[in-house]
Amino acid sequence: MEYHLKTPLQKEEILKLDIGDVIYLTGTILTARDEAHARILELTEKQEELPFDLEGAVIYHCGPLVQKKNEKWEVIAAGPTTSARMSKMTPLLLKNYNVSALIGKGGMDGVTDTLKGKCAYLAFTGGCAALAAENIKNVTNVHWPDLGMPEAVWELEVENFGPLVVGIDAKCNDLFSEIEEKAGKVVAGLR
Amino acid sequence: MQGNISYDDVVFSVADILKRSETSLPHDVINALRTAKANESSPVAREQLEAILKNIDIASRKNIPICQDTGILIFFVDIGREARLDFNLEEAIAEGVRLATEKIPLRPNAVDPISRNNSGNNIGDGIPDIKYDLTEGNGIKITVAPKGAGSENMSTLKMLNPTETGEIRRFVLETVLKAGGKPCPPIVVGVGIGGSFDKAARLAKLALLEDTGKMDELERSILDDINSLGIGPMGLGGDTTALAVHVKKAFCHTASLPVAVNIQCWANRHASVTLGDGE
């Protein structure tokens, strides 16, 4: 199935998604990778407020290449980064915040239970940063610039952002593990 | 003694090959991606390859980087033994990097390994990484290969036992299996066999610069095995897990068998320039 969805995503919209479905997303997304995840969890532990709202948010595993033109940030290139690096920090993140979707590449390890009933993992084609930038219309904010350009949290306005393939749905199905399991059997069978 | 190659020549040529390598791919890589799309039987995989080809087109049309991970910058410099340089070559290359980072622009990726502080200009202790080789003539050939972290992080090195030559293929396949969709397949696989701990890794990296379409029988047979895994573009399943396998060998100690597998994403970026030759 192919869906054109708008943020904030509704719970029913998340629950109907199956692995392999293709999505084009319009609305607001927040970039967050290694250092931003670590800081979110650090502040959460200290019970301090975050400078952005993660309720119903879509998190994009991405360290964009941006440039300031006439006092305004412009996205030059912004493809997904390897989501697996965020695997260990994601369960605690989703326990504390109702994030509705994660966008990244390459899949994640051991998060199907964490995502169950609330969140979908969407895969954007890795390396397709120029294509992604075409569908990012605006930078609405940047948080934690002290983390450096790739690690800061960028609030992006996107239009028909995709194609995003549902890699892990909210029903414990994981397309990546299914494929890796099959591949593992092939390797085991080779001489 | 006056040099036959100037500081400015190097600075601007380095900035130029950086621009070329970051915004466009070598023809052999694009051809391999097109062939993969034509032969791919999975619709999901075809869509991924379509997105990749569209992305390459946008980047080259708009003169912007193909991928936001503009990589850590690795240089291979062949210096003709008759070339005369009256300046510090390393400083000139670094200046080219600084210029390119600002002008193209490139994402600042170089950080201190422990504090993780970003230098902001892709320059730091030991970075850019420059490997020098001595050749004939009076020219210098500079090649840049920007290397993204997604694929570099999935690379492996193993010191096998000398009697385990039969295990080399399995080690390559296990590396590709473990990498799954993380290194942005379809990948190019560079294999370095022999030498020493570090030489094997360098051979594997050099293997990535080889022409994608030119493989010998061994390389093709490893490629066929890799593509039988069905990992596919981005790990979403399909016939195209790798575009090419390239193997480079060196003699090694009779008691050693180092094997390095360097994984490269589909954006196999590299570009070269030759300065001063023939003058």
Image: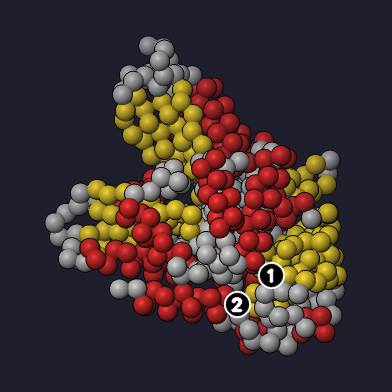
Q: Quadrant of the C terminus of chain A?
A: bottom left
SS state under label 2: helix
Q: Which residue is label 2 attached to?
A: A175
Query: Would residue B133 appear left or right of B267 to someone viewing this image?
Result: left
- Return the x and y of residue B171 as percentages of the image width and height: 33, 67
Q: Nearer the viewer, residue A154 or A135?
A: A135
Residue B63 vs B71, above or below: the answer is above
Q: Quadrant of the N terminus of chain A?
A: bottom right
Q: Amino acid at mark 2?
A: Leu
Could you tell which of marks 2 and 1 lies nearer the N-terminus?
1
Residue A94 vs B37, above or below: the answer is below
Marks 2 and 1 close (CB-CB < 8 Å)? yes
Q: Which residue is label 1 attached to?
A: A165
Label 2 resides on the chain identified as A
- Return the x and y of residue A156 as percentages of the image width and height: 79, 60
Q: In terms of image quadrants, where is residue B232?
A: bottom right
Residue B213 vs A140, above or below: the answer is above
Residue visible at 50% across and 26% down in the picture: B10
The tally of labels here is 2
Judged from this view, the residue extending furthest toward the left is B254
Q: Nearer the viewer, residue B166 or B157?
A: B166
Residue visible at 38% across and 48% down in the picture: B215
- Is the residue marked by circle 1 packed among few (<14), some (14-19), or many (20+) residues within 10 Å? many
Residue visible at 21% across and 66% down in the picture: B164
Label 1 resides on the chain identified as A
